[in-house]
Amino acid sequence: MIVPMPSIAPRRTGAFALAEDVTIRVTGQARTAAAMLRELIFRETGHTLAESPDGTLMVTLDPALRGLGPEGYALLVSPNAVMLRARTQAGLRHGVQSFRQLMTPDGTVRAADVQDSPAFAWRGVSSPLLAPGEMRETIDRMAAYKLNVLHLRPDGDQHELRELVEYALANGVTVVPEIGRSLAEVLDVFPSRWVHIGRAKLTRGLAALLHSHDRVPVRWHDGDDTTAVLGPHGQLTEGDAGLRAVAVAGWVGGSAALPRSAALAAPSAG
């Protein structure tokens, strides 16, 4: 079973056998995703798959693909071949995670025909700042379930925060700082254009601080009033899909770190 449930996934029978002689065909700028896939297969089976122009495990980045959206992917697994396609690196990462969930302990991959894209652009959890190893585990679990925003209160060592942000970005997760005492000193650590202000009032001083750093405030949404979600001037920015996603979808998870349960999946098709 793939979690979150894909938008399109008709049942297929059979499985693709992962063996030492299976090779990977990489087209487009798909080498990063192909490396993730090879590392995953090595960890699970011990097989080091070579690259070949006629490989039966195909990974393709094609910006011209239509109908999948910015984070969508198509994954076809048959007994004879595997084909993973997407128009963005984010889509390929999500496809690799679905491939991982289709793998079985005996080194095969269950047959599937998946086309999927997330229902919401903003799929996140909130976490306290934990020890570096625990934070990386949290990000790994987020990536596994295709979550892409980590709300974090940045009260900690700036060097460790910067390393955490970089690790998150490499795994498709944007770290959004939550307002705290040290916010002004650490804003430059976070490339995110968003700053989470909880349910705090957007005072003139805070608005000026965020504006000076070219940042956009967001806050928890209560009820149906989308004006409760703040844009650069204290209101929802017209046409701003990122903010509107927060207004409509809110967030996923709780105030603690991401649970290990698969039940944490975002309210998303994938």
Image: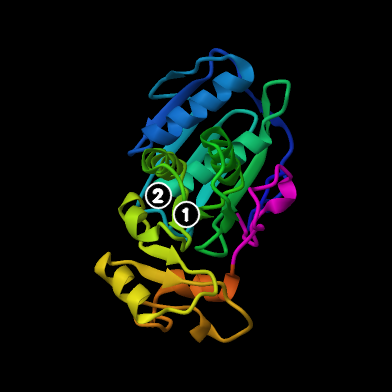
Residue 197 placed where, x, y %?
A: 48, 69
Q: Which mark is residue 88?
A: 2
Residue 70 among magenta residues: no
Which image quadrant for residue 207?
bottom left
Identify which amino acid the numbered label 1 is placed on.
Glu
Over which residues does the magenta segment extend? 251-270
Task: Tell me if residue 76 can be seen.
Answer: no
| Whether residue 172 can be seen here | yes
Which sits in the foreground, 138 or 33?
138
Which secondary structure lies at badge 1?
A: loop
Residue that lies at the very extreme toward the front in this rendered image: 181
Q: Does the magenta stretch include residue 253?
A: yes
Which scheme is used to colour this image of the protein? rainbow
25 and 117: which is toward the camera: 117
Q: Of label 1 and label 2, which has the lower sequence position?
A: 1
In the picture as drawn, the residue positioned furthest to the left comes out as 212
